[in-house]
Amino acid sequence: SLISMVLIGSAVAAGGVLAYLVHKRRQIQTIPLGEGWWGAGEKPLSEDYKIYPFKVQTSDEEIRDLYERIDKTRYTDPLEDCGFQYGFNSTYLKKVVSYWRNEFDWKKQVAVLNKYPHFKTRIEGLDIHFIHVRPPHRENQKVVPLMLVHGWPGSFYEFYRILPLLTQNHGGIAFEVICPSIPGYGFSEASHKQGFDSLAAARIFLTLMERLGFSQFYLQGGDWGSLITTNMSQMKPQCVKGLHLNMFMSTRGFKVLMSLIIGPYLPFLVGLSREDVRRLFPYMEKNIWNMLKESGYMHIQATKPDTAGCGLNSCPVGLAAYLLEKFSTWTDMKNRDLPDGGLERKFSLDDLLTNVMIYWTTGSIVSSMRFYKENFRSNPDNRVDAKTPIYVPTGLAAFPAELMHCPKSWAQIRYRNICSYNFMPRGGHFAAFEEPELVANDVVQFVKKVEKF
């Protein structure tokens, strides 16, 4: 009968729709959440889920110990006219240390750190530190949750200049910002067990957002923060409304190879813009050779972090030289030619030394370096996250002085839903620390696109 035919037709159509949805679901791969326990000893039967207020503190004894160690530093004279080509120039280092010893006020900087609310909560056996900044209440304002994740050798303090910009009203949108410390960095407890990698950090930060009551939110990151927030997007794409990155890479493949061969001559054939060509080529010099010169630290930290970290954890001047050299070179490679490394062109010594002090006072340099070892235990290309595309709406900000450039056509291999890709006019690796206005504006325009605001 006609009714039977209609019913059969409807059932077939419904079955087709269901098959299509199942097919699409299979296409959107996710990384299994799994579970972990990183605390000392065996996992207890129950865990404390409360969130506790936290304050950064210091003491006269801590400062006195720092000064005693600084005063016993032995320096080596630099080679003539070498700038920062051999690392941190010791002539300039003496000036930085003199400021640190005689003018830098750690108690004042502790008060600066405490101007935003700090908290701790226990997740997977570790005390996780974070700051949580809400925007002022305003009429007709949409408040959007946003997590910012730092990298190495940075900290949550990198975001202090961008926080007041993000919590402003941007045409009806303002951000409620959560900045956690990666476990093993600063005030977040380090893992007591081997194997704590970016996937474990991502799972912990997803739990943190859930514990704070956020079912959907935005993410932003660079350096390790880029990988951790990407992993969060792969694990729970239904929770991540959008992912904004200022450092991003793609998997290698035929498309990238063809870009490298044809790109310098016919860039439009392989999806490269003129700006891509300017930043990429000559490829060996700008990407391979430069990275070889700048990645020695990574090989040490990915193999024997405890050996190198031992001296850094005992000598504050050695620690400062090791960390601050990156804030010179990774801001602009040309800084290697300058006697002062161009360090104060983008940063104040107060800001730089505050970041150093976060590592020093928490004794976290070794555990922060171990994060490299854990993430390079095997070939990164064989990890589950390297084989899992990202489908959440993605915004990419390409800074000209970043260590390596990734064109949009390469990024699309991995990030399948790029809503925004912008060439930034200036800035390097520590984007939010160097150029807070540029990063804030790019995040705002990306979120407004996703929100259709």
Image (cartoon, helix red, strand yellow):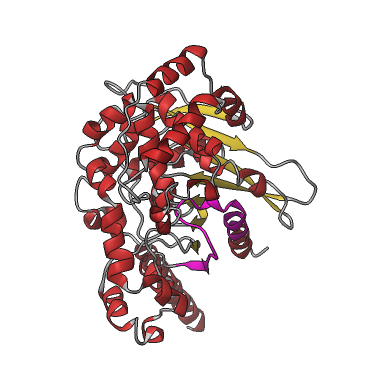
Residue at left offset 24%, top offset 32%: 306
Residue 431 position within the rendered picture, expressed as x and y whole percent measured from the top left:
51, 53
Span of residues in magenta:
417-443
Residue at left offset 57%, top offset 47%: 146
Q: Nearer the viewer, residue 128 or 366?
A: 366
Task: State the residue lying farthest toward the right.
Answer: 139
Residue 3 position within the rendered picture, expressed as x and y whole percent measured from the top left:
51, 79
Residue 205's quadrant in the figure?
Answer: top left
Looking at the rendered image, the quarter that the C terminus falls into is: bottom right
Residue 176's quadrant in the figure?
Answer: top right
Seen in the image, is 244 located left or right of residue 142?
left
| One can see residue 54 in this view | no
Seen in the image, is 89 located left or right of residue 209?
left
Task: State the residue lying farthest toward the front.
Answer: 80
Q: Is 394 within the magenta?
A: no
| One can see residue 177 in this view | yes
Q: Nearer the viewer, residue 383 or 84?
A: 84
Seen in the image, is 164 located left or right of residue 268?
right
Residue at left offset 27%, top offset 81%: 261
Residue 281 position within the rendered picture, expressed as x and y whole percent measured from the top left:
35, 74
In the rendered view, would you say 304 is above or below 8?
A: above
Seen in the image, is 34 located left or right of residue 14?
left
In the rendered view, would you say 216 is above or below 14?
A: above
Q: Is 423 within the magenta?
A: yes
Residue 109 position within the rendered picture, expressed as x and y whole percent measured from the top left:
58, 28
Task: State the residue lying farthest toward the top.
Answer: 61
